[in-house]
Structures are given as C-alpha cells and as structure tokens.
Image (cartoon, grey):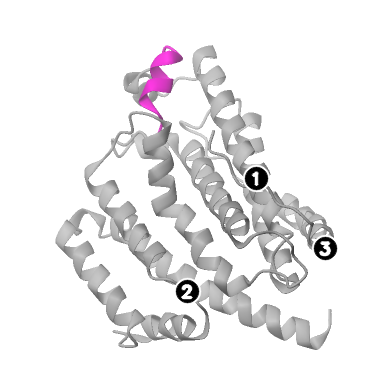
Amino acid sequence: MSKSLMSILITEVGQIRVSCVWCRRTDELVDGPNASQITPTALDRWESRLEELFQGRPFDMLDAALSDTVAKFPVDIQPFKDMIEGMRLDLKKPRYKNFDELYLYCYYVAGTVGIMSVPIMGISPNSQATTESVYNAALALGIANQLTNILRDVGEDASRGRVYLPQDELAQAGLSDEDIFAGKVTDKWRNFMKSQIKRARMFFDEAEKGVTELNEASRWPVWASLLLYRQILDEIEANDYNNFTRRAYVSKAKKLLSLPAAYARSMVPPSKKLSSVMKT
C-alpha cells in the first residue's frame, strides 16, 4: 500500500471513528450504566446539542472532533437525528408488531450509521453505480448488523423485558413472549431462528454489492467488518440456536483469518451496475 493511500486510509478511518464515538455515546444513553435515569427530555437536550455541534458550537472535545468531521465532509444531520429517534423508541416501545416496524427501528439505530459513513468513505471515481444504490447498500449493512445484534442478544434483551422480534412472525411460528422469557430451545424456536437468520443474510448479501463501489482506501475495513459480523450468525447456528443463555461470538482466530479474505475482496474494482436494495 502506498504512503498516500495509507494516509488517506488513516484519515478516513479516523473520521469514521469520530462518528462512531458519537453513535456509541448516543446508544449508551439508553443502554449504558445510567440508562435508568434517561428521559425523553434528556434526549431532547442531546438533540439540541447535536444541532449546536453541526453549527460549529461543540460542547466538549468529543463534540469538537465530530464538528470538524462535519466541516470536512458533506455529512447531513438527519441520520444523526434519526438515531436519536431510535433511542426514543427504546424508551417507549419494547415490542414490534411486524417486520415493517422492526425495519424502521433498525434503520433508526443502525441503518443511519451506514448513511453517515458514505460521505466520509467516499464512492470510487471508477464506480458507475448510482449514488442512491450505494447509499441503499450502506443502509442494508446497517440493517443486517442490527438484525444480527437482535438475534444474538435475545436472552439479554428478554432480561430487560424487551423483545425485538416481529410479534406476528412469532405467532405464526407458534411462539410467544412467554416462550422467549422461558428461554427454552425447541424445534419451533430453531425453525423460527432459521428464518430470521436467512433474512439477515439477505441484507448482508445486498450490502456486499455496495462495498466494492467505495473508495479503495475504505473498502478493506468495511469488508472486514462485514465478514466478521456476518460470522455471528454462523455462531448462533453453531450454538444450536441457543441465544437465550449463550452469547454468540467470533473467536480471535477466526477474526484473524477473515482479514486476508477481506483484503482480497477490497482489491476487486467497482462494478458497472449495482441494483437497489429491496426490503424483504
């Protein structure tokens, strides 16, 4: 890798990390150690602080870092506001009637991250894909990641009284919230999980089409993240779909083995056509 490419990679990864820090701070408002004290009013204040940040008036050093990123790249404020809306849902909505509702939640809390990142990572000058299709692929990656989080954390979420699974699909599978709180792996649960994992993989498939369209310096870390996160679904299967008491994780050895594969894929040049993501 040339020095110029390395410097670009370091810069872009650093700027993306700044955005991720803000996302993590936002997420911890409702999932962190002080989550029980967070109110809608507190989220309103956080949103006002975000608006100040985008206007060049950061509150602290971490805000200042993001403010600098906003000044350097064409980053829009709306995905950031939408993420805060997702946190509001976490405060008031512990159930989702169907996948349409769950999809919207996944967009708010994770799809927004993909939308935030594209302006920083950039689209390859050699790409013939439409800007919309690249953003759609980035959105698909965020959705895939969040669906994977949900499937991995069923037991942990249940301990908090939350069920982030489509209620209608649970009912169709002959399952209910009571089955989830009981935490027993049955054939009904296995079959239900198979269908949920299949859907998550479909979103990963759509996301893969877009990674190739990014700037060369951005493709490797994104491929690495995608391949590693996708393996969590494999681990859920390896655990016999027990996501009640066993947390699926990818071993360090498997993570290291994924890096060469991610690098090889990052060397593939942009394609001539990228289809739009279709919600399933």
Residue at (38% x, 16% y) in the render: 171
Check disc 3 and give the amino acid type.
Pro
The crowding category of the residue bearing disc 2, from other C-alpha atoms within 10 Å (few below 14, some 14 to 19, many at least 20), is: some
Which residues fall within the magenta stretch?
Answer: 165-174
Circle 2 sits on which residue?
Answer: 75
Decide which of tag 1 and tag 2 comes sooner along the chain. 2
Q: Are marks 1 and 3 in contact (CB under 8 Å)?
A: no
Closest to the observer, 276 or 171: 276
Q: Position of residue 58 (x, y in %)?
A: 32, 85
The crowding category of the residue bearing disc 1, from other C-alpha atoms within 10 Å (few below 14, some 14 to 19, many at least 20), is: many
Q: Position of residue 129 (x, y in %)?
A: 70, 59
Residue 227 visible here: no
Quadrant in the rendering for residue 76: bottom left
Residue 206 badge: 1
Give the quarter of the figure containing the N terminus: bottom right
Quadrant in the rendering for residue 236: top right
Give the quarter of the figure containing the C terminus: top right
Mark 2: secondary structure: loop
Circle 3 sits on which residue?
Answer: 269
Check disc 1 and give the amino acid type.
Glu
Closest to the observer, 235 or 265: 265
Decide which of tag 3 and tag 2 comes sooner along the chain. 2
